[in-house]
Amino acid sequence: MPHPFHSATALAEHTDDTRTAMSSATIRRAFLDHVFYTQGKLPGHASENDLYQALAHTVRDRLVQRWISTAETYQAQPSRTVAYLSAEFLMGPHLGNNLVNLGIFDEVRAAMATLELDLDEILAQEEEPGLGNGGLGRLAACFMDSLSTLEIPAIGYGIRYEYGIFQQHIIDGMQVETTDTWLRRGNPWEIQRADCAVQVRLGGRTEHFTDDNGRYRVRWIPAKTVVGVPFDSPILGYRVNTVNTLRLWRAEATEAFDFGTFNRGDYLGAVSKKITSENLTKVLYPNDETQQGKELRLEQQYFFVACSLQDMLRLLEAHGIPVNRFHEKFAVQLNDTHPAIGIAELMRLLMDEHDLHWNEAWDITRRTFAYTNHTLLPEALEQWPIELFGRILPRHLEIIYEINSRFLDEVRVWFYGDDSRLARLSLINEHGERCVRMASLACVGSHTINGVAELHSQLIREDLLRDFHAMWPAKFTSITNGVTPRRWLALSNPRLTRLVTEAIGDGWIKDLDRLRALEPYADDPGFLAQWQAVRRENKRDLARLIHDCTGVVVDPASMVDAMVKRIHEYKRQHLAALHIIALYHHIKSDPHADVQPRTFLFAGKAAPGYHHAKLMIRFITSVAEVLHRDPQVRDRLKIVFLPNFNVTYGQKIYPAADLSEQISLAGKEASGTGNMKFAMNGAITIGTMDGANIELRDAIGADNFFSFGLNAADVQGLLSAGYHPADFYHGSPELRAVVDLIQHGFFSKGDTALFAPLFHGLLEHDPYLLMADFASYFQCQQQVSAAFADTVRWQRMSILSCSRSGRFSSDRAIREYCERVWHVERVPVSLLHRSSGHVQSTRVADQPLHAQANAASDSNRR
Ligand SMILES: *Cc1c(COP(=O)(O)O)cnc(C)c1O
């Protein structure tokens, strides 16, 4: 018999009008309720943050209704589910995005207006969850949006870092880091699920024994155990009822299990152990230029993967599916190698905890995982010293040795007598300190391996993972990255959204290829003028932001030339700086020179331990200061370094930029996604033939795209023929003038040593080929200036750039993963709602009411 509390009316009371209806009047009432009952304030005493929290809860109520409907549907129709494993999710603020996806932006704005409150001011209160470094974490966030929008059952699994990516301040032109205390005022989007907590073991040793059935077994006796507690956030799709879950794990101490310590009366000792356990999810590691074998980082990776796999096994059991069908229920995607330890962990769970034999466990494991590679830089590939690995994960090291031994037996047969190949393919790097190669583990344990742009996938096949490709060519595929048009257009560029929608309807928001319908408007003078007006307004907004953050005044009529991304030598912010210095030199040599006024906008964080990247920031800010001090120059060339680049600032910058700088050394950038956000918003790209730039140029047309420099093959050719950067210096008077100014200390108050580490190697080594690409870049920039001076031509290019960017929606990328990697299908969700006193759902209505209510409360407990 159903418990009275689980009855249909209990559910009905949670779906009544105030909690879920979307009219402006109801939203207003619900908001005032939350100010009073959730924030515990009279409206007259509510702070800005109270208003934000109350509105967030108002919107969350509407998500929860859909969330439970989704859980219900997935319960009733068990189907293959994507588990997206990522150490980073760079979500950005939730409130605005949820308003867009729910379709209640106008209603909420109107409701706030009746209370004389400004919605934009409330939105600005949200502290963004910066749980990622850059592109990789942002990709995971775009994918979550697309999975829900495409109604694919999915769970995002990651880490709930207490401190996200550090906050960057610029003091005396230098980066200074402070901690990101994003949880300080609470997080209204998460629900802690204490009932789904799991235990994770670390350290210790293993014992080998024969069980009662005479079978060889292994027991892991850990040195410590920590508890993983999930925090769930709802991820709503655009104008659908699907709300998938982002489940982030926080580490806590197993106080209750620490009887020994408490029995001995060592209270403070127990408390200090508690603190140690909680350190596990304390802070996100900023990715330095090389991967560093930090113990805590390996523990973080194992921790969230172990929690997530246990969670999947629990769901499997709840559905009554036996463990040997794990791969039928879950398609697990490894976002880079950070979660690759999952391969050894699933083997351990299946064998040691669920009694499967090696061959069956290995078959299930390989059918479960797929691996996305994100980097071509060999120094960034994760490797863990055997000593450290074995100390933290003794059982996993044994399993990896066994995987390796069986794998190398295969290799010996395949490549008879080729010992060097054996050494290259081994999961253990034997050069110097012995290390576990995580990318190799990911390759061996996955059914599919993908790169994130065509060129990147080609270089993986031919270079980075060529030996694996030679063994299993069919495992390799390419899926070009994408970005969600909901956040990166509809939310961040409302003016352009309105203009485009008036012209071609709003179908493009869910089907970005439909932007193609804009093309005829590129020749419509009236539309061109409106397009330019929108972009000018966006530039005014950005100028205001820059003024508020830096005090610098920007002229919205100047070209906004933007390079915003992590600071890294391979991305070559210093090449952009060389161009600026060349223009400066040009004006100083000929004050009447015709130089197109530009605002050079730089933003991006440098990893705190990456000395050269920090020096690049100092170099850019030093050049900025010289330009600013020079009255002949300052109104024509201006450099702004906007501190603390994040998603929130990105949402202001991508829609306002005229020129998008994508100038990495060809063969280094895996894909890039900033390039896509700029292009969608109508910025024109200047870029090398690297990553997804190549595909962007193909889509937009070479006439509407400024490409320059060596391509990846040229780079390899030049390096193998012997690169002599000094030849380029001596061959170009412009380049010589620029390099001489720097070397003579012109930008460092005469200090010739300050920037030497960045530039003294330029004439001898120049590993990122700045000298080789400078002339081509400079010349290409002159063409950019000429094009910008022709307003009609520029606006036309801008419209075409936007209209042809449809392929770079993350919806397209997710469709490709679904068809080619995950083999999952959409499961539409209909809303549970109350109608004349009964809970109804068009899809789940075939069940008796009390069963629905029970299922709903089950999913609550889950
Ligand atoms: C898109 C994005 C990135 C990635 O930019 P790239 O230009 O592709 O390197 C990094 N950080 C943030 C905040 C972003 O929104």
Image: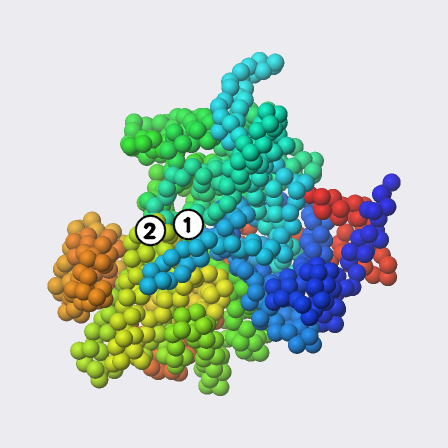
**Looking at the image, how many numbered discs can be counted on the residues?**
2
Rendered location of residue 777, percent (x, y):
26, 67
**Along the line of sight, the residue nearer the viewer: 109 or 517:** 109
Tell whether 161 sits left or right of 687. right
> Can see residue 202?
yes
Rendered location of residue 569, percent (x, y):
30, 55
In which quarter of the view is residue 324 placed?
top right
Callout 1 secondary element: loop
Q: Residue at x 58, y 15 (%)?
A: 211
Tell whether 652 sits left or right of 784. right
**Along the line of sight, the residue nearer the viewer: 816 or 489:** 489
Residue denoted by label 1 = 286
Category of crowding for the residue at label 2, using alpha-carbon neighbours closer than 10 angstroms: few (below 14), some (14–19), many (at least 20)? some
Callout 2 secondary element: loop
**Label 1 is placed on what type of residue?**
Pro
Residue denoted by label 2 = 610
Q: Residue at x 66, y 42 (%)?
A: 194
**Along the line of sight, the residue nearer the viewer: 244 or 628:** 628
